[in-house]
Image: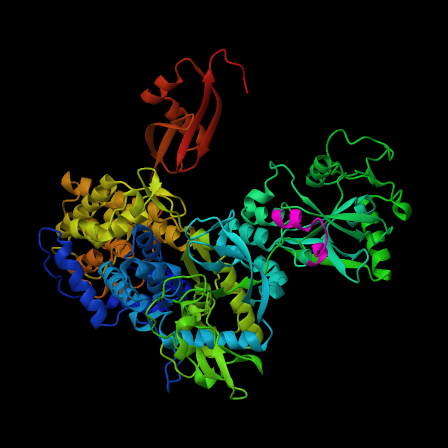
Amino acid sequence: MNVEVRRADDDRGAERGHGEAAHVRAYTRPPMPARRLPERYDPAEIEPRWQRVWETERAFVAEPVSRDGVTPTLPDMPKAYVLEMLPYPSGEIHMGHVKNYTMGDVIAHHRRRGGALVFHPMGYDAFGLPAENAAIRTGEPPAVVTRRNIDRIRMQMRRLGFALDWETELATCDPEYYRWTQWLFLRMLERGLAERRSAPVNWCPVDATVLANEQVVDGHCERCGTAVERRELTQWFFRITDYAERLLDDMASLEDWPERVLTMQRNWIGRSEGARVVFAVDGRNEEIPVFTTRPDTLFGATFFLLAPEHQMLGGLIEGRPEAPVVEEYVARAGGLDAAERGSTDRPKTGAFTGAYVRNPVNGERLPVWVADYVLMDYGTGAVMAVPAHDQRDYEFAEAHGLPVRRVIAPEGADADTPLDGAADTGPGIAVNSEFLDGLDVRAANAAVVSWLAERGLGEVTTDYRLRDWLISRQRYWGAPIPVVHCEVCGAVPVPDDDLPVVLPEVDDYAPKGKSPLAAAGDWVRVPCPRCGAEARRETDTMDTFVDSSWYFLRYTAPQLTTGPFEREVVDYWLPVDQYIGGVEHAVLHLLYARFFTKVLYDIGLVGVHEPFARLFTQGMIYRDGAKMSKSKGNVVAPDEIVDRFGADTLRLYVMFMGPAADDIEWSDQGVEGQRRFLDRLWRMVTAAAPGAPPSGELPDPAAIGGGAAMDLLRKAEQTVVRVDDDLGRRFSFHTAISALQELVNQATRANSAGELDGPEGHLALAHAARRAVSLLSPFAPHIACELWEGLGGARLWQEPWPVADARYLVADTVTLVVQVNGKLRDRLEVPADTPEDEMLALAEGLAKVRAALAGKVVVRRVVVPGRLVNLVVRDRGAPAG
């Protein structure tokens, strides 16, 4: 390599983060004797050997992490915290796991060899229903089943060769982990962000526990699919609503998150601008607030609605003759899920309570009804019904003979303009509204809110669909809530020095509608930490999403006993540079982790507002048209594929199946195809290895001349650019593998045809082999390390990522794809500087193209320089356009 080119390459290496020293090291390391490769590729021999090497040499252990008594040194170099969502250890890993963790592994390898200090840890979301239900099925204690599953998953992951830092491994069920989960709960309690209160909650009758709103999908338990019931219970909540505005506004900084995830979170948080208006209960010294986005329609309210779960309903009907009918209606509504109740197609049912409220703007008495289409999850669970301007209210009024009064009329119309059988929800001018008459909607909104505020009857406000996070669970397998209940002192936090509150062993942990811990008498009965009187422990356990809301912080200090983590080290690693997981956690784990991070920032424990800088959500793997599932009998076990074809084949296939974000159908033939590719690569390298120049240097292109050798060298350097772009910018794993396959195929064809005989040809073959092996290593690390040694290299994972030699990227000729109406018809090789009109003439002169143009008229010609010619045609006589 000449001096000028070497300097240019060094500059590019420095920009990538590994600098001149690392770049020079790649080219000046003393050559190693190439290890003789066996004729046949045998993953059963190769893969265990390299896994032992990586473990012995601590190849993927990251520093710094916090340890007791050791202050880590924070290096001044780029870092890459690469993380996949941690698995539930309720069984073995499946193909979805393999896809998820292979993606992370590819990115970790690419970033490491690009010069970054990589942190790629692993742990287990070990508490919660999946692990507990697995234990119930086997009849063994959850701790035993969970530990066995963790051991099994660890073995499977090691066998797949994932480049994980196993020294930072954690499990959320370890007392030394949930000690700090409890400690963080107490910090929430101190700040008023954790509170215990009575509220209507979602109850899953199968799992026999309450669910957070985010765990209810279309009225059903997101885990087991059972229709959810509503119950009034006293539970623990985190006040995530205090952070609703920040959770929404800070999404503007999440530029590298999928838009559909951001949209799901925006919709879930559900900010609405409107007004809070107070309605006085007629004849009682009570008030019921409502939230409305249309205060301009207050004069059109003709009745008032409450949700069946509304906390004031019982008091309103007490002693009234209407009470039995209302109670029966409420009971029936309790058997319906939220999606069914909110359906626009259902008849609008309801029951009159016998009570009235007063409209604050005119004193009019409005009858109070209970209606199941009113939900507690929006506003206050009370609605001022304006049937003329809300379709659901209109249908309710029609069904129950209630009055309809127009208060907004289209511009130019009057107050008597008929509604024509439906509510008028459009803009207009206020009518029948006293001091608002003649104002447009916006002015009327401002005027009425100002009028209400002057009298203490309302105010401008913002409402959110988001509700506080219900964290209590009536199950055994979870972190105990560190609170003691004392008749004298109330709810008393367990002192920090008494943490962890260790989960006791019990004989019966099956769900019964209350926590199995309540039966552990010796554990429940404790003295009050404040007054010493006899007290009892809280027997609910925490939602497992509490455990997973901060685990990415604990990875930085997995064995630290003096705190959950250290601020300086956390601030070095965070935010996570690349997070990978399923879109199903958009309004569960991802929202909760963002909330936790903001709370910890406010406390001063971390220096970042957001935990994950870049997010990628992978698609699912299907077989026979359905998601892989044991119940469907369509599961392909990872171990089975590894036994038959090797771990590298499986890793390569799950990355090659298609775009990583898409749901993809499994193909047994596709697996076999990737194994054939690795066999082909093996043969290519064994052909190139004897006498291969060890330094990797390339001569000036003029010394190579043209022909197959130059074509292969250019292809090799083009492949470097393509793979680097696919991995570093586009997350396009399948196209990166396709580029590598093209390189290997071209080299194999040329060598088999004798086109690479001679020194230049062998140099080109050896260089292409080096590039192919180096670029393949993130996908198939075992075979890549083996072949790298066969080519005279050392530890491939320590080598800088290849930088293309720009001298070989300039092509004398280009191959154009020629299409007719987007369909491939032929290919055309032309000089790189060929003018467009000549390209078109040559393309239209090709025999296959002429045949496709017969009887057609060319209506448009598209040329993408260096890539394709596309001729857009229509039948002769067909109308244009």
| Closest to the observer, 391 or 46 | 391
Q: Identify the residue at horizontal 87%, vertical 40% (top origin).
A: 431
Q: Identify the residue at horizontal 59%, vertical 62% (top origin).
A: 199
Region of the chain picked out in magenta, as a range = 315-328
Q: Quadrant of residue 424?
A: top right
Total marks placed: 0
Up the image or down, 685 lies above or below 399; here it is below
Q: Inspect the magenta stretch and tell me whether residue 286 lies in it.
A: no
Where residue 560 sits in the image (x, y, percent)?
38, 80
- What secondary structure is the magenta-colored segment mainly? helix
Q: Quadrant of the C terminus?
A: top right
Q: Is residue 85 visible?
A: no
* 246 horizontally vs 798: left or right: right
Where residue 609 sits in the image (x, y, percent)?
55, 67
Q: Identify the residue at horizontal 87%, vertical 34% (top origin).
A: 414
* 116 horizontally vs 431: left or right: left
| Closest to the observer, 268 or 860 | 268
The colour style of the image is rainbow
- In the picture as drawn, the residue positioned furthest to the bottom comes out as 532
Where residue 314 sits in the image (x, y, percent)?
67, 57
Where residue 687 sits in the image (x, y, percent)?
13, 49
Q: Inspect the magenta stretch and tell me whether residue 322 lies in it.
A: yes
| Closest to the observer, 783 or 530 | 530
* 471 horizontally vs 358: left or right: left
Q: Quadrant of the N terminus?
A: bottom left
Up the image or down, 761 lies above or below 539; here it is above
- In the picture as drawn, the residue positioned furthest to the right comes out as 435
- In the picture as drawn, the residue positioned furthest to the top comes out as 877
Q: Is residue 133 visible?
A: yes
